[in-house]
Image: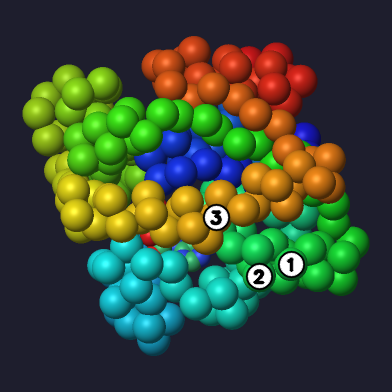
Amino acid sequence: MGNYVFLGAPGAGKGTMAGLAAERFGIRHISTGDILRAELKAGTELGRQAQQYMEAGELVPDALVAALVNSVLGRDHVRDRGFILDGYPRTVTQADLLHEELDRTHLNLDAVVLIEVSRDLLMQRLTARRVCPACRAVFNVLFGPPARAEVCDACGGPLVQRPDDNADTVAQRLAVYQEQTAPLIEYYESRCLLRRTPGDGGRETNFQALCRCLGLAP
Ligand code: AMP
């Protein structure tokens, strides 16, 4: 089905859209944020190294994240089914490292999809976001609440707010995005890989727009 990068500010819906695409098309969803949170929860050395950056809303060092992604990209089922990179690359250095790895392993990127959302909506979405640590489902108390308050519709587990979804850390994450990740828009535009899709509607509307953008039937 192809190999893609989903680009967009925190709260743009990269994870939600990648999750829907994984379910619908069987493509592998690789979220560096999810992998780092799992390492942190498991108390690994990598998780310990990443923790201070994540809690401050800063980026984890490039080499650390690149090594993590490269190890996942090397797996056979990822190569066979195609992948969506959600949250990687986030700096120009990471983009260079990704392309070195793709060249080395004879993989191609089919497209980089920029999910566009206004800043006000990003702030609202992030601070009202609730996640299920057990099954990774994402809800929003304003725009897509679960049927029962603070309980996951999918698996019945308790929902939590991510520690980095408080207002101060969200503002820092958006600033880091503007400074370090937004330059990737031009980076991929100049390589003729960038496609844009609106992310400010509801989940289904956004997914249909994404499928159209990728030339796939939703
Ligand atoms: P996310 O779930 O994508 O919003 O990521 C949560 C946090 O994990 C970020 O604020 C960073 O601290 C860290 N992180 C995730 N992906 C990357 C990346 N590609 N480079 C550096 N840090 C990352």
**Residue at 33% across, 67% down:** 54
Name the spot of residue 218 as percent of width and height, x first. Answer: 63, 16
Task: Give the quarter of the image for residue 46.
Answer: bottom left
Q: Which residue is mark 3?
A: 181
Instruction: Please tell me in which quadrant of the rendered image residue 156 appears.
Output: top left
- Binning the other alpha carbons within 10 Å of mark 2 as few (below 14), some (14 to 19) or many (20 upward) gives some
At x 61%, y 72%, the residue is: 66
> In the rendered view, would you say 120 is above or below 66?
above
Residue type, numbered disc 3: Thr
Q: Residue at x 38, y 71 (%)?
A: 39
Residue 217 is left or right of residue 164, and the answer is right
Residue of label 2: 93
Image location (x, y in percent) of residue 34:
42, 57
| 40 left or right of 198 in image | left
| Earlier sequence position, callout 3 versus callout 1 | 1
Alpha carbons under labels 3 and 1: distance apart: 13 Å
Three-letter code for the amino acid on which mark 1 is drawn: Asp
Which quadrant holds the N terminus?
A: top right
| Residue 186 can be seen, yes or no | yes
The disc at residue 96 is 1
